[in-house]
Amino acid sequence: MQLFKKIEFENSSQVGWGIEALVASGEGPCGNTGKRISSLGGRVTCHDQLYDALSTLMDDPRAAHVLVVDCDSYGGLCVGRRAFAMLSEEVERFPVILISKECGEQTFPFSREAPIVLRGPVSSLALRVAFEKSFRGQVLHACG
């Protein structure tokens, strides 16, 4: 007799710890990315314009714990990489997650000198791994 266990990829267990995610996406907070982050226990602040999100982060690096960019909303992965390069030295070590359909291979770099890159549309499981990699060995500061 063989038994199979159904694995639910859309509803991973919470890893949010109250993570404040600053999401730059044209789909709004009720879109796919915002819903997935919320389902993991994170709080989402969404910006329709990429440069508004970057400005918010540069003005106050403690406004969020992680920046998540839906690159496809703004023209592709190269735009997301350019936005990552624009971050000032104050937020250079800030965790950034880029999501794009153009992503051939998901990357989870050990240092924050490069962004985490996820394949779009993003799954809860990929976001969970990205959050765990982003905050390994850290105690998060209180936002707000």
Image (tube, rainbow, N blue to C red):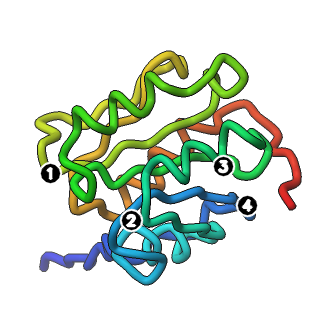
| Quadrant into which the C terminus falls | bottom right
Please rate how many residues cluster around mark 3, counting C-alpha atoms within 10 Å: few if below 14, some from 14 to 19, many from 20.
Answer: some
Q: Which residue is mark 3?
A: 56
Name the mark nearer the viewer: 1 or 2: 1
At label 1, which amino acid type do we have?
Lys
Q: Given contact means CB atoms under 8 Å apart, are the residues at marks 1 and 2 in contact?
A: no
Name the mark nearer the viewer: 2 or 3: 3
Q: Residue visible at 60% across and 69% down? A: 44
Instruction: Tell me the CA gap for discs 3 and 1.
Output: 26 Å
38 left or right of 33? right
Of mark 1 and mark 2, the one earlier in the sequence is 1
Residue 115 in the image, given as x and y percentages of width and height: 43, 30
In the foreground, 135 or 84: 84
Residue 84 in the image, given as x and y percentages of width and height: 44, 30
Q: Which residue is mark 1?
A: 101
Q: Residue visible at 28% across and 37% down? A: 79
Q: Which residue is mark 4?
A: 17
In the foreground, 85 or 32: 85
Q: Secondary structure at mark 2?
A: helix
Of mark 2 and mark 3, the one earlier in the sequence is 3
Q: Given contact means CB atoms under 8 Å apart, are the residues at marks 1 and 4 in contact?
A: no
Residue 93 in the image, given as x and y percentages of width and height: 64, 23
At label 3, which amino acid type do we have?
Thr
Instruction: Tell me the CA gap for discs 2 and 3.
Output: 25 Å
Q: Given contact means CB atoms under 8 Å apart, are the residues at marks 4 and 2 in contact?
A: no
